[in-house]
Amino acid sequence: MSKLAKKVALVTGGSRGIGAAIAKRLAADGASVAITYAKDASAASAVVRAIELGGGKAIAIQADAANVEAVKGAVEKAVSTFGRLDVLVNNAGTAIPKPFEEATQEEMDRVIDINVRGVFATTQAALKHMKEGGRIIMVGSAVGERAVAPGLVPYAATKGAVKMFTQALSREVGSRGITVNNVQPGPIDTDLNPASGDWAIPQKAATALDRYGRVDEIAAMVAFVAGAESSYITGANLTVDGGMNA
Ligand code: NDP
């Protein structure tokens, strides 16, 4: 029996990078999966096709995480398509690396709107449908706990907010049998944070394993937290960072 058979998951920002790996892994574990994306419909369709080719069920929904009405609509679409919602993965997120004093207000607002405001709105909409055994999972960041390099000040602040959001919310929904956890990746090779280039050198050097992580290494932790075996883990910040914060 698949670990997530009969479960329904919504993964925000599931068309590329970490979110795509999470969507595929949850589907491989038996869940029906809805993904959201902002711009790239063809990348989102490719994830849906890959899941369907593997015998799973998936849909893609265009919903910018910064648009509260759009994310509410995405939650409703996932529920109306698959009949329920068991797992929400708040993965959509962005960073605009640059020295803090050079960041524009517009850039800072964008990072806050996607990484924090969107997480609040999506979680609130999802909780309306979640029952006993529900799973709210954030994709925060190792830099939400410890800032290892310059250039990510607003981003680190938003991921710190995600960390406390996780801890505080776990206290409110625990009595309903719903867990809330925050998976905190270290440097993972994606379009957002490629393992090659100038930004990568200090990040790789900061890890104990002396390498970037792979998207499937984050998806494995998310799959564990989504499953029944993690039933006594809540309000936790689960860092998967190759030892960057050690
Ligand atoms: P990518 O930029 O590689 O992928 C981002 C995904 O999110 C894409 O599917 C993209 O779709 C979607 N997305 C982007 N903006 C929005 C938006 N406004 N609304 C909805 N979807 C959106 O990022 P990663 O996979 O690297 O990052 C995923 C998460 O992991 C983020 O929360 C990030 O902060 C976190 N993280 C990443 C780390 C890393 O080293 N890579 C380290 C620590 C945390 P589209 O193409 O359509 O825009």
Image: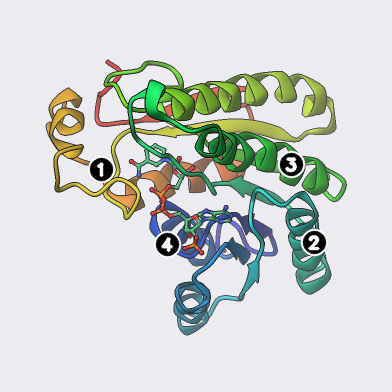
**Color theme of the render:** rainbow
Within-10-Å neighbours for mark 2: few <14, some 14–19, many 20+: some
Q: Is residue 229 visible?
A: no
Residue at 87% in and 46% down:
128
Residue at 65% in and 57% down:
10
Q: Nearer the viewer, mark 1 or mark 4?
A: 4
State whether residue 83 is above or below residue 169: below
Q: Where does label 4 land, which residue?
A: 16
Counting residues from the start of the chain, the first of labels 3 and 1 encountered is 3
Amino acid type indicated by mark 1? Gly
Report the Cα–Cα distance between label 1 and label 4.
15 Å
Q: Judge: label 4 CB < 8 Å from ligand 1.
A: yes
Q: Nearer the viewer, residue 62 or 172?
A: 62
Report the Cα–Cα distance between label 2 and label 3.
12 Å
State whether residue 7 is above or below residue 188: below
Q: Nearer the viewer, residue 209 or 56?
A: 209
Q: Where does label 3 land, which residue?
A: 123
Percent across and percent down for residue 209 are: 15, 30
Q: Judge: label 1 CB < 8 Å from ligand 1.
A: yes
Q: Are marks 1 and 4 in contact (CB under 8 Å)?
A: no
Amino acid type indicated by mark 2? Gly
Helix, strand or loop under label 1: loop
Counting residues from the start of the chain, the first of labels 2 and 4 encountered is 4
Helix, strand or loop under label 4: loop
Q: Where does label 1 land, which residue?
A: 213
Counting residues from the start of the chain, the first of labels 2 and 1 encountered is 2
Report the Cα–Cα distance between label 3 and label 1.
27 Å
User: Left or right: where does residue 80 sit relative to residue 24?
Assistant: right
Q: Where does label 2 land, which residue?
A: 73
Amino acid type indicated by mark 4? Arg
Q: Are marks 3 and 4 in contact (CB under 8 Å)?
A: no
